Image (cartoon, rainbow, N blue to C red):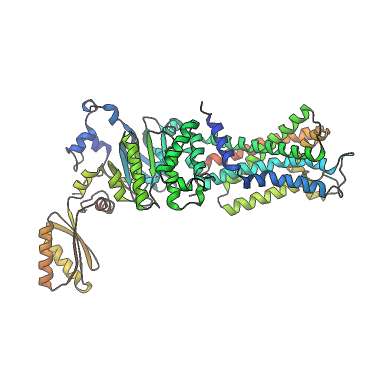
Amino acid sequence: MRPPRWSPEASATGAHPLWAGTEVHRALFAPRSTVANSGATEPVVFAEALRHTYDRRRFALDGVSFTVRRGEVFGLLGRNGAGKSTLIKAMTTLIRPTSGTLRILGLDPARDGRKIRSRIGVVQQSESFDFTTVQGNLDVYGVLWGIPTAERKRRREQLLAQFDLGEVRKRRAFDLSGGQKRRVQVAREFMHDMEILFLDEPTVGLDVIMRRTLLDAIRQEVRRGLTVVFTTHNLEEADYLCDRVAVIDEGRILVLDDLENLKRLYGGKKTIEVTVGDGSAARFFSSLTEGLGSRGSVRATGGSAVILTDDPRGALATIVALSQSLGVQLEWLNVRVNTLEDVFLRSVQHGGDAHGTA
Amino acid sequence: MALPNLLRLIYRNMAVNTDPGSLVILIGLPGMYLVFFGFGFASLASSSQPGTSYLSFLTPGIMAFQVVMAGTVGGGILWADRRWGMLSQLLSGPFTRLEYLLGIMLTSLLFGLGGALVMLGIADALLGSVPIQPLALAVIFGSITVGSIFFGALMLLLAAMLKSNTAYNSVQILLIFVVNFASTVFYPLSSGLPLALRILFEVNPLTYVSDAVRGAYLGTFSAIDGFQLLVLLAETGAVLFLAVRSYMRSDLSYE
């Protein structure tokens, strides 16, 4: 049976069949009086049934509901055009959702936009610079945020060092490489204090070392109490950074949970990849589907197939036995541990049913 | 104590628009007009005001021309901020759209007034100090204020409407040339002009600014100059309304 999509109603009542009664679920939705520090669990972002359309025909956000708790790193995963950036724009008050309820830090963006914006930081997906030097960009931004001169200089120097921008400090931001520009953009945002940092794909264009430097810098801020809402395509960095992730597609949240829980619930099955000679592939995969029965699902494309199974050892035995009996040459055979990528792909491909049983 | 939001935005606009290259265009170009045209055409041109040199005639015109340059600063800031992502970045900070717009308008105004002062200084260096009465000074800077707001709003309207770099720059350059040369900045409005050109001169808001500044500077301010200023005020209100409406409805970026 196809499990229902996540909804606040289901979550609030513990009705979601996948995680009702789990430890994560209890931690997330325990009555407030039972939580030691209720202030810490009060959502800093509360979204319910958010919808937004740009053209009155297609919904960029289509009934999105979720909460973000203070001090957590909340990841939004999704393909291009899934609705991640629209959601970020709504949370940062740049657009007003067509309908639904949104509260940021307990405030209504429609009425208290400025109050909200003065307590958040935003790193946009696209480039944004002033036509001045790297150092100038940081300085001007500090002035814009009202940071006193001495403190501004201190932060500027610290950030230039932290983001390895010291050597290019006198160069114009627009003349830098893609990765350097991204670093300037992120470093600049740390010029001011904030309670929530919204990062829209902040690591695009960064090399491995700088990506890790950036993620570590964010982690450090999180340890000091910063809440981070983070969109990304990169599942490894979501895995590295996020406490919880929501997979969003076509404007809807397909799954939302603690990372480990997601992997356990959605990635419980193992993945076997198998490739055979093209000539005999159709016959082989048809027999394999029959042979595995309820022990696994086979998704074949040309000469290759991906098999999801709870019983990888039994499935492997079936594959080998079939290849011998049918005289089919196995060209590639691989068993994989499930990753966040599997969770993501399955949830997107099956609209929230990551088990692939739809 | 932290500066109010509006002042912070003005500081930022000034800081990112006062690099040497921009200053050469903003101040150097009108300054060169003043020096080269002022001396170059002096032997050809006979001033419409007896006892006045062409350079004296040109100085208030070039001061008035600063309002157009100020307008290009304002339009340029909005256009660049949308194109390069700073508009949405700033508006996701502690600023409102209106503050951002006011920041641009006031920056334009500062460039207009500052530029006019620089031109006055250059003229003083070339002509010797010209005594200007306080009331005349008020008329000069009042006219430049209104003119800067008019052209600032006009350029903002363009920046809010035009998305392509080529289109924005082409329209802006064309506008600067037409407005500049079809006005009384460089030469007086005379009956010898072809009718079409004369109409263009007479409906050109820069003519109103130029005439008012010149009248105050040379001590020939007339009722017609005053009436033209009132017309300019009304036109400024209308263009400002259109610019604000267009800006408030515009997207935050060109993505």
Q: Position of residue B170 (x, y in %)?
A: 63, 53
Res A98 visible: no
Which residue is drawn at the image coordinates 30% and 46% (left, top)?
A238
Q: Nearer the viewer, residue A319 or B24?
A: B24
Q: Is residue B234 left or right of residue A188?
A: right
Q: Is residue A299 left or right of residue B221?
A: left
Res A267 visible: yes
Q: Position of residue A63 (x, y in %)?
A: 33, 42
Give the farthest residue toward the right: B50
Asked if A301 appears above or below A228 in the picture, the reply is below
Asked if B73 appears above or below A143 in the picture, the reply is below
Q: Position of residue B97 (x, y in %)?
A: 52, 36
Which residue is drawn at the image coordinates 48% and 48% (left, top)?
A168
Q: Is residue A298 left or right of residue A204?
A: left
Q: Nearer the viewer, residue B19 or B208?
A: B19
Asked if B16 appears above or below B138 in the picture, the reply is below
Q: Position of residue B198 (x, y in %)?
A: 80, 47
Find residue B117 and report its image quarter: top right
